[in-house]
Image: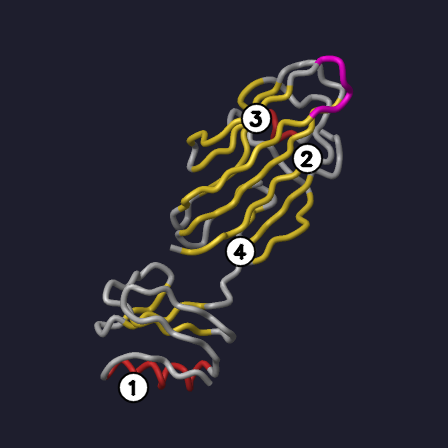
Amino acid sequence: MVPARCPGPCAILALTLLLGCGVVLCLGQNDTEPIVLEGKCLVVCDSNPSSDGAVTSSLGISVRSAGAKVAFSAVRGTNHEPSEMSNTSMTIYFDQVLVNIGNHFDLKASVFQAPRRGIYSFSFHVVKVYNRQTIQVNLMQNDYPVISAFAGDQDVTREAASNGVLLMVEREDRVYLKLERGTLMGGWKYSTFSGFLVFPL
């Protein structure tokens, strides 16, 4: 075990927490970032602790989960157009989940809800099939468009609107794809929507 380097009463409480968690870690001091080596708990001594996703004491010790991993990837496996696409929101729906670590992607609604504040990476690849219309796909964050992608070639049977971005996302923010322009009447088989937490804030 690598001891937590904290002054005074902070060290006593940190050691108690470490014994309870049974972890191995290296700890930063004021104005430094914590470094997790192993284990399930992280004890951080910080003069300006964040309470987001952590239990913080008046001594400036916060305990965060070091294993809080978040990632999802959804795919459209068929070209059958679901009845949901006729709704006014024009959310682009997916029917299979390849990865859903943390279970924060709702497949039925095709919406990701962030479990904590942080920097997230999102990417999408929406395929239009036998469709001569130009489509515009927006990545939405809480009903506001963040980025767009277009597909408008009329001489191909399949074309994709693709884009990706890093976003600062607040806890419980909702991220999803919206068809802003055109239709997906021919289907959107092989389309994907993916995202993961890069690091928490």
Q: What residue is drawn where x is 33% and y is 65%? A: 32
Secondary structure found at label 3: strand
Check whether the beta carbons of the residues at disc 3 and disc 1 lie within 8 A of each other: no
Magenta stretch contains residue 190: no
Give residue 191's mark. Answer: 2
Amino acid on which the number 1 mark rests in the picture: Ile
Query: Looking at the picture, how far across and down is residue 163, in whole percent?
Result: 57, 33
Q: Which residue is mark 4?
A: 70
In the foreground, 118 or 181: 118
> For this view, does 53 lie left or right of residue 74?
left
Check whether the beta carbons of the residues at disc 4 and disc 3 lie within 8 A of each other: no
Magenta region: which residues? 154-159
Query: Looking at the picture, how far across and down is residue 110, in whole percent?
Result: 58, 40
Q: Quadrant of residue 13?
A: bottom left
Estimate the spatial distance between the alpha carbons at disc 2 and disc 4, rounded to whole Å: 21 Å
Q: Which residue is mark 3?
A: 149
In the foreground, 117 or 45: 45
Q: Decide which of tag 1 and tag 4 comes sooner along the chain.
A: 1
- Crowdedness of circle 4 by 10 Å Cα count: few (<14), some, many (20+)? many
Q: Quadrant of the C terminus?
A: bottom left
Q: Quadrant of residue 135?
A: top right
Q: What residue is drawn where x is 30% and y is 83%? A: 11
Amino acid on which the number 3 mark rests in the picture: Ala
- Crowdedness of circle 1 by 10 Å Cα count: few (<14), some, many (20+)? few
Q: Which residue is mark 1?
A: 12
Amino acid on which the number 2 mark rests in the picture: Ser
